Structure formats: C-alpha cells, structure tokens
Image (cartoon, rainbow, N blue to C red):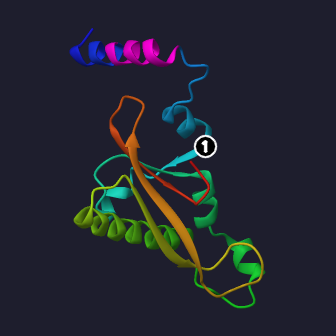
Amino acid sequence: MSDDDNVINLQRKRMEAFWGEPISVYTRAQALDDGTLCDLTPIAPRYGFKIPMACTSGVWHALEWNEQDEARKDNATGQSTEGRLHDVLSLAGLAAREAAQKEPTSTVYFDVLMVPRSGSVSVALNQQFILVVGPGDQGEPVLTLMLPGED
C-alpha cells in the first residue's frame, strides 16, 4: 500500500467517523462510463485546459448538431458539433482566465451565442454555461462543464 493510499484511507475514515458511512456512492468514473458525463479531456488541451475535463450529457446534447437539426431550420446555419464545441471551450477558457485574474473561484458562468437545436429558430440565442473545478474520485482537480440547474 502506497503513502497516497494510506492518506486516502485515513481521510475516508475521518469522514465516515464524522458523517457515518455513505448511503450510496456514484463516482465520476461511473458517470463517464454510463454517459452521464462526456469526456472532453482529449480535446481540452487545445483550449488551454491542463486538467481532466468532462461535460454533462445535457451540455453535449446542446452542442451536438446533425443533419436533422439542420433540416428543421428555415435556412442553412453553418452549424456543426465541432464548431459549437470550439466556441464553448474557447469561451470557457477565456472566462476561466478572466476569473482567475480577479478573485479565486471554483465556479465560472459564461454565455455563448448558439443556434438552438429544437424548433425552427435559425438565429443564435444566448445560452449560459457553468464551468466548475472540483475534486475527482481521488481528490484530484477536475473540470465539469454544465448547464444551469445541473450539478
């Protein structure tokens, strides 16, 4: 057993002594495996992110663009999943850097103009996103991109 394992076990024992045993545990790894979270770690470094990053399935649904989405619009919008992801991650990076220069925070709110997936509206509307840095399954820093109302 490594020193890190001993520290984690000690921390777990302290938490259980204070709070009691957990009723249920749902890990980030499980959320990634079952699709509740979508892993953005492979693409995130292109936008300046240096720690693991994931988005909620709600965010991915808002970003994903396909031929059926385009067919519902009155005119061509020039949308693509890759382009929408680029816009969101670029603005997330800008918002995170700006927030880091002001006051340390674990949560950053930012807006992106996006053509909605549902309905026939083909003009960009404001969509708010939330970027949160928090602990991963082993206490390591991880980023999660989510929509308002998600946690």
**Count of marks overlaid on the render:** 1
Residue 132 vs 17, above or below: the answer is: below
Outermost residue on the front side: it is 18
Q: Residue at x 33, y 55 (%)?
A: 105
Q: Residue at x 66, y 69 (%)?
A: 66
Residue 34 sits in quarter: top right
Q: Main secondary structure of the magenta part?
A: helix
Q: Residue at x 54, y 69 (%)?
A: 128
In the image, residue 119 lies at what x, y percent?
77, 77
In the image, residue 99 lies at what x, y percent?
31, 65
Tag 1's secondary structure?
loop
Quadrant of the frame with the N terminus = top left
Residue 126 sits in quarter: bottom right
**Front residue of this view, candidates 73 and 118:** 118
In the image, residue 117 lies at what x, y percent?
69, 72
Location of mark 1 (residue): 35
**100 horizontally vs 123: left or right:** left
In the image, residue 109 lies at what x, y percent?
45, 65
Density class for disc 1 (Cα within 10 Å; few <14, some 14-19, many ≥20) is few
Callout 1 amino acid: Gly
Range of the magenta residues? Answer: 10-20
